[in-house]
Amino acid sequence: MDYRTLGRSPLKVSPVCLGGNVFGWTVDEPTSFSILDAWLDAGFNFIDTADVYSRWAPCHAGGESETIIGKWLKASGKRDRVILATKVGMDMGDGRSGLQPAYIRRAVEDSLRRLQTDHIDLYQAHQDDEATPLEATLEAFGALVKDGKVRVIGASNYTAPRLKEALETSRRLGLPRYESLQPLYNLYDRATFEKELEPICREQGVGVINFYALAAGFLTGKYRKPADAGKSPRGANTVDKYLNERGQRILAALDTVAARTRSKPGQVAIAWLLAQPGVTAPIASASSLSQLAELESALRIRVSADDIALLDQASD
């Protein structure tokens, strides 16, 4: 396994990160345990979740994913084999949101309790909070690092100007900096990251763990016609956003490369991301062991320069 350094931190992560958004939502606890066990058994070590997962689902309050991962960590005894990432800042209800220092201190304790661990390897600001000074947020994160509750901090959903400002603030005040960025980036959603965020990340040595690596499942070829929207709880949104002329062109290119490499479109989409010099570890979810096996196999696909050119052209 080709482990990669996350930013300038000491964390060594596997080249793909397992997304935990499905745990406790579309994946029940026993299946979640099986997927997590299989992930580590295959040599991977990186798992990402968030306190808010899966508050959007009916009758859910948030914390479902962290709770399942915590139960698995306790039952399996595998905490020392995991690079565990979670996030704070999204609306948890009852005024619990944002990146104010007092709320960060409260939220981290809640996450540690649900995860049944004494530290979080990568603690990320889930979204920017422009109402709270960056200095205050970074000082709060820095205190968690000093106390040993968090090893490294990262950012998610930050704009390029705010990421740059945050990095400069950490440098100026001698505080821990965001060592990773979690942006939206995949073969379809390219422009914002490549034009605005990637130059900063590469220049500053910030690791990139992009979410929606498979564009909510669209790049697997699961949604090829409007009627396919019923295939998953989020299918309607996926079809509305991606099933257009450009999306069909991207699927055709994925099909072509998949046929040549004897693989599947989703595996090719991951292989394309792994070939991008600015990406550390794309995040992808799996709701079954068969999906997980496909994700693992993506690392063995060898896409050529011509394949990359074809995919780039189709997604322009």
Image (tube, rainbow, N blue to C red):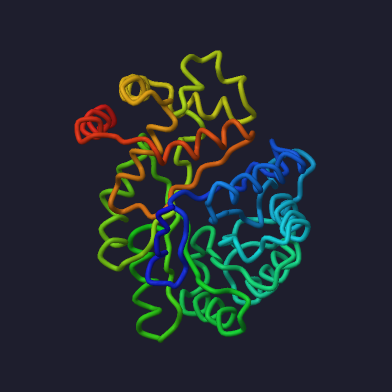
The residue that appears at 65% across and 48% down in the rendered structure is 36
The residue that appears at 75% across and 55% down in the rendered structure is 67
Residue 197 position (above or below residue 234) = below
Quarter holding residue 164 = bottom left
The percent coordinates of residue 147 (x first, y second) are: 61, 84
Position of 257 with respect to 306 (left or right) is right
The percent coordinates of residue 130 (x first, y second) are: 48, 65
Position of 223 with respect to 161 (left or right) is right
Please count the marks in the image: 0
The percent coordinates of residue 137 (x first, y second) are: 52, 75
The percent coordinates of residue 281 (x first, y second) are: 43, 52
Quarter holding residue 266 = top left
The residue that appears at 42% across and 64% down in the rendered structure is 6
Question: Dividing the image into 4 quarters, which one contains the C terminus?
Answer: top left
The residue that appears at 31% across and 36% down in the rendered structure is 302
The residue closer to the viewer here, 103 or 110, is: 110
Residue 43 position (above or below residue 74) = above
